[in-house]
Amino acid sequence: MVKVGVLGLQGAVREHINAIERCGAEGIIIKKVEQLAGIDGLILPGGESTTMRRLINHYHFLEPLKRFGGQGKPIFGTCAGLILLAKEIAGQDDAHLELMDIKVERNAFGRQRESFEANLAIKHVAPDFEAVFIRAPYILEIGSTVEVLATFNNAVVAAKQGALLCTSFHPELTNDDRLIAYFVEMVGDAKKALAT
Ligand code: GLN
């Protein structure tokens, strides 16, 4: 069975585990660096990216997470997780994992739109996905090898680059599992490819 970890330092962890298991994979909460060796793919959940980064430093996760992505193992960053994946963050000198060739703006939808839902067409996934945005970032710029999967009001809110997937919104907060199922499939494909 495909094993999908969820970084369990902070944020919406349990909801992702439940969704992964509904998609037929094993969900594992990752709290220690050593656990990364036992999983085929990883979800970086939503929450608060600066708090998450503090905990990543505290538990010495930064380099191991970079290596995990560098090996071609799939990572799905949702909301704060998208911010963690980005090479560049608008208005900040330093980024976090710097794995994905995107520039992001934090809290990009403004105060009056702290949280909202929108129906999105997501390429490869669903023509009608109810997306939950909570103090969400969006993607300002993408590199040439990044594929845009969804936009909302002309802003990029979902993208893919090789084995890296990210969304501005929280796919785990509804009972529509199509996006997590898509990621679980990516993890299964990568596991086969890395084994040969
Ligand atoms: N605004 C948060 C941040 O910058 C992300 C919000 C979320 O993950 N729901 O980390």
Image (cartoon, grey):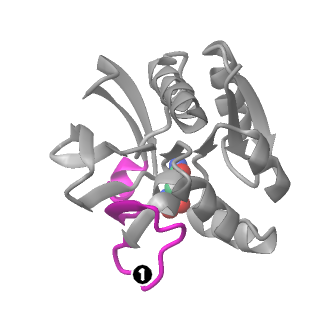
27 and 81: which is toward the camera: 27
* Residue 32 visible: no
Q: How many numbered circles does the render carry?
A: 1
145 and 91: which is toward the camera: 145
Q: 33 left or right of 160?
A: right
Q: 147 left or right of 12?
A: left
Outermost residue, front side: 196
38 and 125: which is toward the camera: 38
**Which residue is identified by label 1?**
92
Q: Is residue 24 above or below residue 168?
A: above
- Secondary structure at badge 1 equals loop
Residue 134 in the image: state x and y as whole percent: 47, 45
Q: Quadrant of the C terminus?
A: top right
Q: Quadrant of the N terminus?
A: top right
Residue 112 is one of the magenta-drawn residues = yes
Q: Main secondary structure of the magenta part?
A: loop
Q: Is residue 140 above or below residue 27?
A: below
Residue at 39% in and 72% down: 89
Residue at 42% in and 86% down: 93
Magenta stretch in the rendered image: 89-114
Q: State yes or no: Cβ of the residue under disc 1 lies below 8 Å from any atom of ligand 1.
A: no
Write down the quadrant of residue 130 in the picture: top left
Q: 119 left or right of 29?
A: left
Q: 118 left or right of 18?
A: left
Write down the quadrant of residue 14 in the picture: top right
Write down the quadrant of residue 56 in the picture: bottom right
Residue 156 is one of the magenta-drawn residues = no
Residue at 36% in and 80% down: 91
Q: Is residue 76 above or below residue 102?
A: above
Q: Amino acid at mark 1?
A: Gln
Residue 90 in the image: state x and y as whole percent: 34, 74
Mark 1: give few (<14), some (14-19) or many (20+) Cα within 10 Å.
few
